[in-house]
Amino acid sequence: MNKNHAMNYCVTVLLVLGGMLSSRAQSIAGNLSLMSNQTIKLEGFSGLKTYPISSSTIDKDGNFSLAYSKSDYGMGYLVCNDSKPLFVILSGEDVEVVGESLSFTETVKVQKGQENLWFEQYAKEHPRREQALSAWLYLDRMYAEDALFSKQKKSGSAIKKEQARIKSEDAAFLTAMPTDSYVRWFLPMRKLVSSVSTLAQYRPEEVPVAIEAFRNLDYTDPRLYQSGLFKDAIEAHFWLIENSGGSLAEVYAAMNASIDAMILRLVSNEKVLNEVTNHLFFVLERQSLFEASEYLALKVLGDERCTLDSDLKKQLETYRRMKVGNTAPDIVFDPTLFASQGRVISTLSDLESAYTLVVFGASWCPKCMEELPQIVSQYTKWQSKSVEVVFVALEDDRAAFEGFAQSFPFASYYDAKKWDGSIVQDYFVFATPTMFLLDRNREIVLRPQSVQQMVSWVDWFLK
């Protein structure tokens, strides 16, 4: 080996060693005296999901050690069997904890790791400050509004002063930490997410500021994505708007404004855009906030900067193609594919009833097993009011279809193609049960979210 080769070799070795040292995994170690010989795991957060980081077996003396890397930066948690999780900050520092068991979190203390020490301290002190603030707020209102106390100006002033002191002390704790520390970012974030019920119930004057804070969140920020608060932030944001005390029109207007703010930041990250949109759409549908879910669907479908995966696009497309006021596609039926009982029709447009309820469901759908019998019980009444029912089954097995639909008195059909059938595709069905109420011209009058909603519509509009 000549001199140049030797020098190059040494440089290469140094670079490799330097890289190894710079990427050295950090550890979370410690002693849990009552958990010997049990498996302990370190889990991390990735958006709406969790993922395993490392695992180990606690030795007979209660000692353990787990490794994590720079890519795990954010929040994590220790878990062992059915014990409570212990949340830890994975900020690049070595952490040491000691205690008896994760099931007895009050015994577990952080011995090493400054950011985790700050986190532990704030987690203990902040709830007590919040309790004190709520108590002082109650007294503040009493001394301001109750004639028995309103004359006591000195007491009222002292109450306000103490409230200000508590808030200042809380803020000072956060600002004293280094600006680049994860815990300094995380604690106000957790405070925002966890405070929504208290604000809605006891401090409504703070709700507008909290909603604005949610609107300013950047869901593409890795700190939020790996914080374990990603899902909670989405849900808390819209829960707070829903429970802000405004009228329904005001609630929907506020939700639309929040959706606009979120999408504006999300268009830069396709993966997170799809993840947030999919979950938010689910949350809004679950809460029967259909105007907001429709607004979300049309917003992302109409924005050319939004790239959606195929399943989500199909799910949202139903709001654009199959919204109330649009004309539903006609359906041509194969007469051999109807259930042996019930009615057989050639096309959907052949029906002469004033209204037709098209129901998509399946024998494997638990909700359908509840709702289809309810439709059967209402069918005679609906027929008397010129409402017909057509059931389209997402089945690929004739026997399963017959077993499910044989007692249905209305037209029941299957094409053996399940989700890939042309009818399902034409109607942009993405879940079961799905219902569309059409008039004689196949205009979509209603998209019932339950049989009860359909019952209420019939009782109100077809008296």
Image: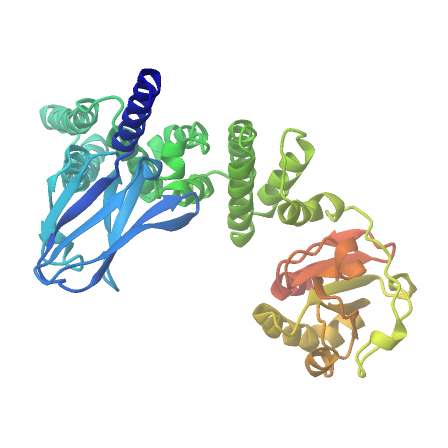
| Left or right of residue 182, residue 152 in this image | left
Give residue 430's position: percent from left, percent from top: 66, 56
Relative height, residue 135 to residue 334 (above, below): above
Quarter-wise, where is residue 203 in the image? Answer: top left
Q: Nearer the viewer, residue 370 or 354?
A: 370
Q: State the residue in front, 435 or 62.
A: 62
Q: As drawn, is 224 to the left or to the right of 424? A: left
Q: Quarter of the image holding residue 329?
A: bottom right
> In the rendered image of this protein, does residue 215 appear above or below residue 415?
above
Q: Horizontal and vertical percent for residue 174?
A: 21, 27
- Look at the image and tell me in which quarter the N terminus lies: top left
Identify which residue is drawn at 86% across, 65% down: 353
Q: Is residue 244 visible?
A: no
Quadrant of res 130: top left
Q: How many numbered discs sit on the rendered protein?
A: 0
Residue farthest front in this picture: 1
Quarter holding the C terminus is bottom right
Q: Position of residue 438 (x, y in %)?
A: 79, 57
Left-right relation of 70 to 178: right
Residue 309: horizontal and vertical position, in percent?
63, 43
Identify the residue at horizontal 70%, vertical 76% (top origin).
376
Q: Is residue 27 above or below residue 336?
A: above
230 relative to 332 in the view: left or right: left
* Residue 436 appears in the rendering: yes
Q: How is the image coloured?
A: rainbow
